[in-house]
Image (tube, rainbow, N blue to C red):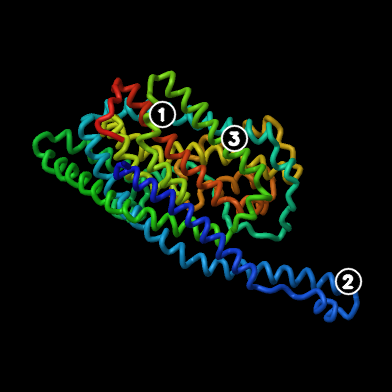
Amino acid sequence: MFSKKNRLITIIVISMILGIIIGYGINKSITNEIPKLETSYIKHLSKGNPEIEQQILHASEQLYVSQLKKIKKNVASNFSILSDIFLRLIKMIIAPLVLSVLVMGVAKVGDFKSVGRIGGKTIIYFTFATLLALTLGLVLVNLFEPGKVMALELPPNSADAGVKTNTQTASNFIAHIVPDSIVRVMAENEILPIVVFALFFGIAAASIGEIGKPMINIMDSLSHIMFKVTNFVMGFAPIGIFGAITAVVIQQGLDVLGGYVYLIACFFGGLLFFVFGILFTICLVLGINFFSLLSYIKEPILLAFSTASSESAMPKTIEQLEKFGISNRIVSFVLPLGYSFNLDGSIMYMTFATVFIAQAYGIEMTMGDQIQMMLILLITSKGMAGVPRASLVVIAGMLTMFHIPVEGLLLLLAIDQILDMGRSAINVIGNAVASAVVAKWEGETLTPKSEV
């Protein structure tokens, strides 16, 4: 018999399959119901003039495509409401959960020296993992050259990719880290400033001894309540996932995959290599049971993949890592930081996508350019978790910096949701491994506390 958790995962998979089938059916029915101008009518309008006939044909095709996109978007919005509700419920949980578990974790550590030691190990690992992810992205795109192999039709120079460039400076980076109001950053779910506040609050609560214990107990109670709320919200997951998948397939269809199959295969192959090659090796060296860890976080991975949102998996990931045997003080510290500093899938995508667009335009990026880009991304990729479509925003900045047309992002937008599903899942795995690594460095034995 399936356990309760396995039943939920099974229902989620069924929801994804149903979403694909229903979404594809609706996509095809819309396409079939919207008629094109008949060729005979176009010839009638052109009065036998071949040049005018081509102009009318081109305009007709553009109008047809535009009309299809608009109708599909409107229909898809009815289904995406379901995923929006689910993601909003998840966002409702994150701020109080992160604050409570981190205050608890820091209070258990007890002093700045211990927090500094754990923080130093965490940043060292994040930097190492980021370098590996950036390097792998460059190796993949240079080895398989998808931008050259696919020979895609380039977008016009006047096209707008709809993504604003964002140059990360020291000033706005610090402004993003240090909160000016804990109420505001909690309202906006900015994880990194919440982490900074919780560090000060937790250490202060621990340092005043008996007087601080009632507040620590309140945070302990709050964290348990929020985990219970998380379990309630997870009951809505299959419905939200069904809405997300259906909406994507209605808008994009499955035909779009055909034109991008080589690119998708290259990128997803790279993600799999990162997980089962790089992360597995790291765990093997440190004596971490990698496949046992994956079995504990399979539900958060599936959530992140199906909703294309790492954030949706965060509350459940915290809970499952503690069940895996990682102490609360490590999980509550490492995981929230990871959502700003260790998004491995997204980081790998940044180098991969930038060079892919350069290849598509026939622009040669020298090895020096690519190393320079990698070192810049090592810094600018940090603290971007609160920026909508963060990966695309950072990539747009790289394109501008290396004089590559920003409209080249349009080459990726058609399948960005699909690529984002893979990126989000790998982000969850990367942060789970990071938590396990820091726990091992702190001398923890990682003995699972309960059944998967």
CA gap, disc 3 to disc 2?
A: 46 Å
Tell me the tag on residue 291.
Answer: 1
Query: Answer yes or no: do the residues labelled 3 and 2 have beta carbons within 8 Å?
Result: no
CA gap, disc 1 to disc 3?
A: 24 Å
- The picture places residue 59, in percent across and down from the top left corner, at 75, 71
Nearer to the camera, 190 or 73: 73
Question: What residue is at 27 percent from the left and 26 percent from the top?
Answer: 114
Name the quarter where the C terminus is drawn: top left
| Residue type, mark 2 in image | Glu
CA gap, disc 1 to disc 2?
A: 63 Å
* Badge 2 element: helix
| Residue type, mark 1 in image | Phe
Residue depth check, mark 1 versus mark 3: number of the one nearer the observer = 1
Residue depth check, mark 1 versus mark 2: number of the one nearer the observer = 1
Nearer to the camera, 420 or 164: 420
Query: Answer yes or no: do the residues labelled 1 and 3 have beta carbons within 8 Å?
Result: no
* Badge 3 element: helix
Q: Which residue is mark 2?
A: 51
Q: Which residue is mark 3?
A: 137
Question: What residue is at 30 percent from the left and 20 percent from the top?
Answer: 443
* Badge 1 element: helix
Between discs 1 and 2, the one toward the N terminus: 2
Nearer to the camera, 331 or 320: 320
Tell me the tag on residue 142.
Answer: none
What residue occupies the far left of the structure in this picture? 210
- The picture places residue 149, in percent across and down from the top left corner, at 74, 41
| Residue type, mark 3 in image | Gly
What residue occupies the far front of the structure in this picture? 1
- The picture places residue 382, in percent across and down from the top left corner, at 47, 40
Question: What residue is at 57 percent from the left and 41 percent from the top?
Answer: 350
